[in-house]
Amino acid sequence: MALNKVEICGVNTAKLPVLTNEEKDALFIKIRQGDEEARERFIKGNLRLVLSIIKRFSSSSENADDLFQIGCIGLIKAIDNFNTDLGVRFSTYAVPMIIGEIRRFLRDNNSIRVSRSLRDTAYKAIYARENLMKKNQKEPTITEVAAEVGISREDIVYALDAIQNPMSLYEPVYTDGGDTLYVMDQIRDKKNREENWIDRLSLSDAIGRLGEREREIIVLRFFEGKTQMEVAELIGISQAQVSRLEKSALRLMRTYLNA
């Protein structure tokens, strides 16, 4: 891993700014007031800290640019979570968080190699997502993230998927009031559109007995093959609500069809 290069990720490391403790304190006051310019200046003023940390991983075969970007994500998380009332220096708080972010990356980076351009796209999306969450106080949609970074929605999804580890279809991803949402609930399954019981039975009457919203969800999910996340975006409710309404509608339909 080459760390003696002057430029990393387009950043001239020889010209990185250095902030005094007084400047950091003043910037943090502005950051807590929502000053984005102060936040950007604080990030740039601590890039030397990231650079010094990735040197600890010089024995790694990973590209220095990749580690620098991961370290920057750790730095941003540290800035967003740092509490000035703790009475510790920011660097004391940030260093273990940056190291932890890099170690997670090295641990999870298995033998499946992801191209540099895909990683760059994924990191931009992650950074944009965190900024949008901080700004709007809610989870942004993929469409909003794509608009923020100026990259197509499809490319964002592909890049984020590329850096994820495989997981079980039965991995729980969300629980709300005892109603668990699993990975399989987020996956488009064309087979469900062709299940024998859908072909055989008279669904028209069963679907007609559903409320308007439940009927719309069933059509989108099992006739158009949409994921629960896509349905939630289309009709303007949460994915957990879609899951509950879908399960309720299926129970009603089965009860009617089995009567």
Image (tube, rainbow, N blue to C red):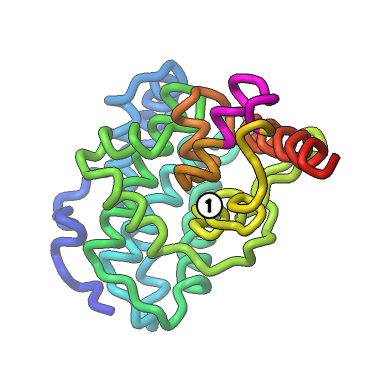
Left or right placement of residue 97 versus residue 68 in this view: right
- The residue wearing badge 1 is 193
Q: Residue furthest top?
A: 33
Left or right placement of residue 112 versus residue 249 in this view: left
Number of marks in the rendered image: 1
Query: Closer to the camera, 122 or 72?
Result: 122
Relative to 33, residue 131 above or below:
below
Left or right placement of residue 47 versus residue 210 in this view: left
Q: Is residue 208 magenta?
A: yes
Q: Residue furthest right?
A: 259
Q: Is residue 30 magenta?
A: no
Query: Closer to the camera, 93 or 218?
Result: 218
Please identify the quadrant where the C terminus is shown. Answer: top right
Q: Position of residue 253 (x, y in %)?
A: 73, 37
State whether residue 113 appears in this view: yes
| Residue type, label 1 | Arg
Relative to 165, residue 78 above or below:
above
- The residue positioned 74% from the left and 45% from the top of the image is 180
Left or right placement of residue 228 versus residue 179 in this view: left
Q: Position of residue 219 (x, y in %)?
A: 53, 36
Please identify the quadrant where the N terminus is shown. Answer: bottom left
Magenta stretch prevailing secondary structure: helix
Relative to 124, residue 64 above or below:
below
- The residue positioned 43% from the left and 37% from the top of the image is 130
Q: Which residues are magenta?
A: 207-218
State whether residue 77 appears in this view: no
- The residue positioned 54% from the left and 45% from the top of the image is 222
